[in-house]
Amino acid sequence: NIAAMATPVLAWWMGWKSLWRYLWGWLRAVGLAGLRQRAACVPVRVKHGAAVTAEILLIESVKHKGVFVFPGGGVEANESTAAAAKREALEEAGIIGTLGECLDEYDDDKSKTRTTTFIMYVEDELEVWDEASKRSRCWFTLDDVDRFLSTKAGHRHILASVQRRGLQAIIAGAPPKSGLY
């Protein structure tokens, strides 16, 4: 019976995998391993009308209801930070778009991570997405982002980068007539 033979092998493999995760976490914690790579994006919706304006999409934190964050997460093996940012935006926010320039790279000594953040010009919002049942998404003006965004240092660092760059510069970098807006 193949299932009977596979069970001990799987248990052995899961034991080693858990041990490796523990050891790698410990090595990172004591500074003997590199920083864990993360990618995030600042989703922007450029609205063309009498005046060209922009809004920023935030997603609700899974752990802290009512607190909003930028979409982002870990970079998988053999994945670029740009590809990870697009994947995380799709999984967490249900959005598809074109990545603009790299906005910033931020090292977090506490969590031992390096986060690369991109501007994303949103082209489509899906009605159904992976984490739709876990979190909501909401469009904000830049002023409102400051009020509703998580106080965590990483999110505040990304917001400061957006503010330094300026919304008009971000709008100017948008692909011509991007999105459905």
Image (cartoon, rainbow, N blue to C red):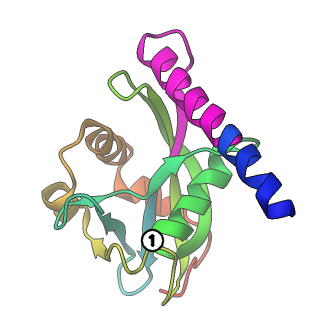
Can residue 41 be seen in the rendering of this structure? no
Residue positioned most to the right: 1
Q: Which residue is mark 1?
A: 93
* Residue 174 sits inside the magenta stretch: no
Residue at the image position 29 percent from the left and 41 percent from the top: 160
Quarter of the rendering containing residue 16 = top right
Magenta residue span: 13-39
Look at label 1 and name its amino acid.
Ala
Residue 126 shows in this picture? yes
- Between 2 and 88, the one nearer to me in the picture: 2
User: SS at mark 1?
Assistant: helix
Residue in view at x 63 percent, y 44 percent = 81
Does 116 sit left or right of 142 as displayed? Answer: right
Q: Residue 151: give x, y in percent of width and height.
A: 17, 45
All told, the count of numbered labels is: 1
Badge 1 density bin: few <14, some 14–19, many ≥20, Cα 10 Å: many
Q: Quadrant of the N terminus?
A: bottom right
* Residue located at (36% from left, 69% from top): 57
Q: Is residue 23 magenta?
A: yes
Residue at image x 38%, y 80%? 133
Q: Judge left or right: residue 105 versus residue 75.
A: left
The dominant secondary structure in magenta is helix
On screen, residue 114 above or below 174: above
Q: Which x, y percent locates residue 18?
A: 56, 35
In the image, 105: left or right of 9? left
In the rendering, at what x and y percent does residue 10 appear? 71, 48
Vertical order, 155 against 135 (above or below):
above
Of the pair 169 and 45, the residue shown nearer to us: 45
Q: Nearer the viewer, residue 140 or 135?
A: 135
Q: Position of residue 179 (x, y in %)?
A: 56, 81
